[in-house]
Each structure stands twice: as structure tokens, then as C-alpha cells.
Amino acid sequence: MAASPDAPDEIESRVTELLDATIARGICSAAAAAAGDQTGQRVWWRGRTRSVPDAGVPIEPRTPFDLASLTKPMATAAVAMALVSERRLSLDDRAARWLPVDGAVTIAHLLGHAAGYPAHLELFHRIWAGDLGGATDRRAALTTMAMATPLERAPGVAATYSDLGFITLGALLERAAGASLAELTTRLVAEPLGLADAGFVDLLGPRRALAAPPPATELDAVRGLVAGEVHDENCHAGGGIAGHAGLFAPLGDVAAFARAMAGAPDHGAGRIDAAVAETCFTSSAAPGTSWRLGWDTPSPQPGVSHAGDAWPRQHAVGHLGFTGTSLWIDWARGRWAVLLTNRVHPSRTRPEAALIKDVRRAFGDLAWALCERGL
């Protein structure tokens, strides 16, 4: 019998066509995607590691993408959730217990972008110029500069998405747990969830071997073609390990994390308790914000959300990454969707790079249709 237009195999073909068209239009050179629930999944990977100075090599299942701000939920927030689950931290703990910051800032404020930090500061210019602000190394300089940034508003008043808060949170977790964020991510998140290849690329020490050639990001006037080291300038200046960016992982690891988080409020995930997961997915650190603790939520306005219009607005959280990555979960149904690209290659300023929103929305709708029709 012929397949219906909405049968899973037809939807899968439409995902493949979407990724092929995305690459053909020059939005990225590589794209990998996955969607599933607690019972199964479908995966796709298309394209090559770069388009300049040549076409690079075809990507494969273990190709590690620069996840950019997916580092926030997958590393920093997940580590915080694990430490709270183990009662080594509390969401209401004051950050000043470990760091020289405003005494009213809590861990929840930092997770929920409500500590009062400004949206963005280009700290990397100072560090690249050799100004460490009295710190002992580049990593310490980045965290010191972030922590010393004057707050724009009192903690808890409003939420403004800010890397500075997550840089500060990463430093807090390191001091509270007595290990680097990279070590904590491996021990508390990657190993318990079976993420074999996820990790940071340390630019100040021995570099970990990546499982396969990574997709390149930008062709930068200062750094050259960036591949295999973090794209984010502040994280790069700080040595590649920071609370806001720096994590690399292949599709399989991001999908495994998404699947685990989609089931976490029901039965936990690795070292993260179910109650802690539900609290972080449902709580905000300021009034009137879409941000939860370490996660964002889809916009309720039609045609706006990068998750697409089909993805539910209730019991849904996710995150985006500047390099062209995204992750969304529906924890009421245990469903999830992951899209990884290098849309900043070879330049973030290309008009095509901005089209990633359309791709994300289209994939979100197809992923939801696939889950609805059965995997």
C-alpha cells in the first residue's frame, strides 16, 4: 500500500530535502539532525566540514560540532542540576559565598539570566591584547572580568540573556565542587549519560583528540579558518573552557542528552533528580520572562519561535547556539529534536547565515510531525 503523505518515511524524506537545500543555499556546509522520544529516534547528517578553502570531507555520525550556547544547558546548567540533586548546592545559595559578586545574586539568578548582567561585552579584546587584569592566566582573566562587570539592574528584577552570567556561574561551580568545568561536565553529565565524545577543547593545556574532523566555523581575519577550537571569541580568549560556550559534541551525544532531559522530570537523568529537573524546567528567576533555569521556552507568538509552530508551548524547553545549533524537548511526552549546523561558515555576516531561523522552524515542525506519526 502506498505511504500516506504524512507517513514517517515521507517526513524523513522531507527532512533530508530540507538539509540538502540548506547546504545548497549556502546557509552552512554541514548539517546533522535527530528527532525522537523515549522509544526511538531518526537521524540525518549531510554535507562537508567546510566550503573554503576547499570542500573539506563529508561529515559522519561522530563529527563533533561546536555547540556554542548549547554549552549552557548541556554543561553548565546540567552540572548545576547534578550538584543541586546531590545537595552540594541549592538554587537559593548566594553566589557571594564563592565569588566576589553582588551579595543578592543567587545560583537561580545566574541560571535564569536574572542576575542583572548586561547582554554582552567583548572582553576578548583586552585578553587578546595581553591585559589579564591582574589574573594569573587567560581563563582566570575572563571570569574575573565577567564577575567584575557592574550590574545593570538588581538581581531578580528582569531577565536579560547574558553570557556574563553563565561565565560567572561556571566559575562558581568550579569553586564549589573543586574541579574544572570540563572535569565536572565529564564526571557529572557525560559519563552518567553515556556521552562518549562530548567535551571541551582546552586551548591552554593538552588538547583532547576529537573523534572526527570538525565542521569549520568562521574564516576570521585574525584567527584564520576556525576549526576544532571554539568559535566564541570570549571563550577563546579564556582558553576554550567557559560556562557559556566551548562544548563540542557529535549528533549522537546531543541526541542522547536531549532524550535524557526529555525524560528527566519523570524519572531523573544520570545524576540529576526528577524533582530538580522539573524545577529547572518550570521555574523562572524573574517575572515576565521566557527563560527558565538554564533553558528557554518557545515563543507563544505564531511565526516567531525557532522551535517552529508545531512544537508545543506547554512543557517545552530548549536552547539555541550561535554557530547554528538548537535543541528542543517536550518533557510531558518525552519528545526531543536536535539540529546542528555551522551556519557561521565561512562568515556570520552573510545574508544566508540569518536564514537558519527558517531552517530551524521547518525542522521543528517536521520533527514534531514525525513524532506524532510514530518513529
Image (spheres, rainbow, N blue to C red):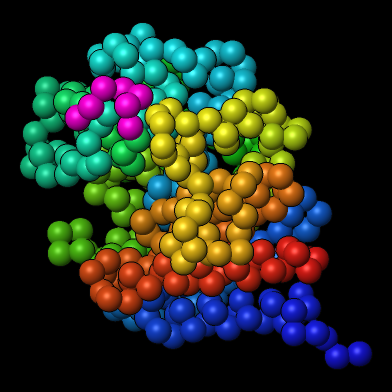
Residue 173 picture location, percent across and down: 43, 22
Question: In the depicted view, which residue is nearer to us: 348 or 8?
Answer: 8
Residue lying at the far right in this picture: please name it: 1
Q: Eyeballing the image, is 348 above or below 247?
A: below
> Which of the 4 image quadrants contains residue 148?
top left
Give the extent of the magenta segment: 152-158
Indicate yes or no whether the magenta region holds residue 154. yes
Residue 273 picture location, percent across and down: 68, 26
Q: Does residue 286 show up?
A: yes
Location of the C terminus by quadrant is bottom right
Question: In the depicted view, which residue is nearer to us: 199 or 83?
Answer: 83
Q: Eyeballing the image, is 60 above or below 288?
A: below
Question: In the depicted view, which residue is nearer to us: 127 or 255?
Answer: 255
Residue lying at the far top in this picture: please name it: 97
Q: How many marks?
A: 0
Is 304 displayed left or right of 282 in the figure? left
